[in-house]
Amino acid sequence: MSPSKNNKKRLFIIDGYATLYRAHYALIRNPLTTTAGIPTSAVFGFANQVFQLLEEENPDYIVAAFDSKGKNFRHELYTDYKANRSAMPDEIQTQLPYLWELLDGMNIPVLRIEGVEADDIIGTVAKMCEKDDLQCNIVSGDKDFMQLINDQTLLYAPQARRREKEVFNAQKVSEKWGVGPEHIIDLLGLMGDSSDNVPGVEGVGPVTAKKLIQKFGSMEKIYENIDQIENEKMREKLLNNKDNAFLSKQLVTILTDVTVDASLSDFEKKEANNTKLESIFKELEFTGLLKKIGSDTSISPETVQRKKEYDLITSLDRLQSFADSIKEGEWLSVDLETTSVNPMIAEIVGFSFSVKKDTGVYVPIHFKDKVDNLFGDNDLEIATNILKPILENEKIPKTGQNIKYDALIMKRFGIDLQGIEFDTMIAAHLINPNARSYKLDNLSLSHLNYKMVPIQDLIGSGRNQITMDQVALADITFYAAEDADVVIELTDIFLKELKKQELYSYFKDIEIDLLPVLIDMQFHGIFVDRNYLLSRSEEIGIKLDALEKSIIKLAGKEFNLNSSQQLAEILFDQLNLPMIKKRSTAEAILTKLKEYHELPSLILGYRKLFKLKNTYLDPIPNNINEITNRVHSSFNQTMTATGRLSTSTPNFQNIPIRTEDGKEVRKAIKAQSDDYQILSADYSQIELRVMAHLSKDEALTKALNSGEDIHTFTAKNVLM
């Protein structure tokens, strides 16, 4: 039973924008979008939390409160109030119309009052509940609401990484902050609040504020007894910031008497309008939420069942017959089953092909419990020799999902894949550059409404995961042929969509034409001097050990140098250094703290060397291929929404270029022998040249053509 439950009827009031922002940032690394590219993370998370609240708590009353646009009385008190707040991200702004539709469909009233913050609306509703003997539950993670907590008002706070909620009563507030709800405004007034740009007393953090309130009882009492504070520096801080302290207390105090044009009866829970919700959830592609409201006409992939004609080729005659059947000018979908995601070490387990949807063939090479060869003395060699002519025939257009991967493996086995005309992963990225995934099974769900066999069904996951060559032939055949089949169908769909969006020429002339170049680049790899990196790592390891000893000595006790929380305790609680931005130990803060103590400077030096060693010097040698003695970094065309090429395993682009330490790492990237040199080439101000070409600006074009320094040219024209 929830600790918030008792015999009273209960009202839940949702801190609207706080809940929406929380949902957005919870999925910031893997944002949700529709197949049309509409961001949906915030609305999805908001809806999920409200459904969870309704299911677990079954409230008697429910309402949501939101800030209104514009300033309020707090801005009149302090012009810099919330001045550090960034504008609402475009991704959230885009979702607001859906949020209002969602709340309307769920029949949840919305309170929004011009010139009044949501906090004050919530405070007023909490006071209304007290008068009508209702229990009020404030759904928010904002600590400011703890000042409202009493016998009838609780804070129902969501937790960051788990589904449970933490319900705060007066006792839990005291346990967390060391002061009761009645003194939260004193605490916040002293320590300030960086999120709202509330100044507080400079240099006073939560620990010091708590001690002062515990000793004196309130902010007023602290200043009445200021002479009793023995610490001279602390006394000076308090006196110098007295006006800020009382101003801050006023800013954080939540009003409980604003005019709300509604009564509690207006907030009684009503049945949701599932027809409206179904329409919203279908538009936003919320399959799980559709099921939650009992909709059986959803976008679920389970609705599509197809008859598949997949052939398993296990004889030499059938293999040759298949190869002879492939015609020039007709699409051939190509896919490999392999033993590794690394194309430079992967072994070929089998070939799969498709020439039209709902069909496919699989040519196995290795599989579980294989006893005899299928095609002759050496299955891989024979199959390769038979398939090589069609794979190297540039008149047979090839398509694939991340076909660069397959081409790299084939190149290692003597096949130069020609006629690459399409890649469904690259096409999907161009059509929707903000999508969170371009995996084939996700594309199949989104565009074909067809659920593919999950790879986990074949190889498992975690410690018990096996490789594809350990899968039984009966199990792998359907999975492998299905990959090629889905690609051939997606190729037709994406081809039409690229042309519709006028992206096909870009796709063909840039992305696809670049593929052979990237394949060669990745295949040949980059030489990296392993011994140099190991030597530098050892040198830096010695420096780190020495730095750690010096830091521990200055701190007076051992602590985890990589723990920001433990470092904050040393800096602010033990050494009493000023808290420039609360208890932050970010680089910019430590740089400012260097003038107060030697320790921050040593920490900065330690962090720089630690990152250099653990991000570059130690990991890069692990990516050196033992056979080629080179690093075969992957060049990715679908990693960035802007279309910029990126590298991974390792990410060479992340190696610092302007710092001395970064230059030290880059020294390891060199020509493998004296017979070669590294040539570095770059465009000169390419963006400005494109801009001059498109704008037809005569002055800019003339300056670029004449080789004039563009910065001098601009300054001269601006200041004339």
Image: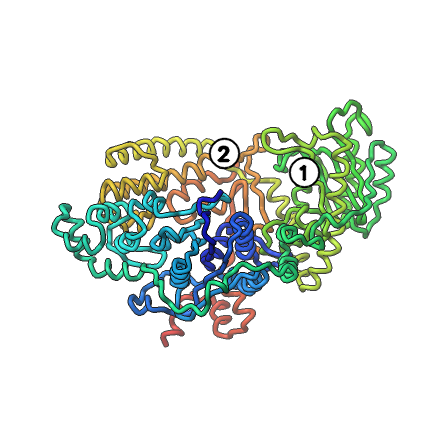
Residue type for callout 2: Pro
Q: In the image, residue 148 lies at what x, y percent?
A: 35, 55
Q: Quadrant of the C terminus?
A: bottom left
Q: Within 10 Å of the Cα at label 2, are there few (<14), some (14-19), or many (20+) other Cα atoms?
A: many
Residue pictured at 60% horizontal, 54% vertical: 435
Left or right: 310, with 586 as reference point? right
Can you say whether 21 is above or below 341 in the image?
Answer: below
Residue 119 is at least partly visible in this image: no
Can you say whether 392 is above or below 236 in the image?
Answer: above
Q: In the image, residue 561 lies at what x, y percent?
A: 34, 37
Can you say whether 447 is above or below 87 in the image?
Answer: above
Q: Nearer the viewer, residue 28 or 65?
A: 65
Q: In the image, residue 508 lies at what x, y percent?
A: 68, 57
Q: In the image, residue 438 lies at what x, y percent?
A: 63, 49
Residue 455 shows which numbered tag?
1
Left or right: 648, with 306 as reference point? left
Residue pictured at 15% horizontal, 55% vertical: 224
Left or right: 40, with 410 as reference point? left
Left or right: 593, with 474 as reference point? left
Residue 499 is at least partly visible in this image: yes
Q: Check the image and name the residue furthest to the top.
A: 371
Can you say whether 712 is above or below 526 in the image?
Answer: below
Find out whether the residues at labels 1 and 2 contact each other: C-beta distance under 8 Å: no
Separation of marks 1 and 2 at Cα, in angstroms? 30 Å
Secondary structure beneath dot 2 equals helix
Residue type for callout 1: Ile
Residue 621 shows which numbered tag?
2
Secondary structure beneath dot 1 equals loop
Q: How does the figure colour the protein chain or chains?
A: rainbow
First in sequence: mark 1 vs mark 2: 1
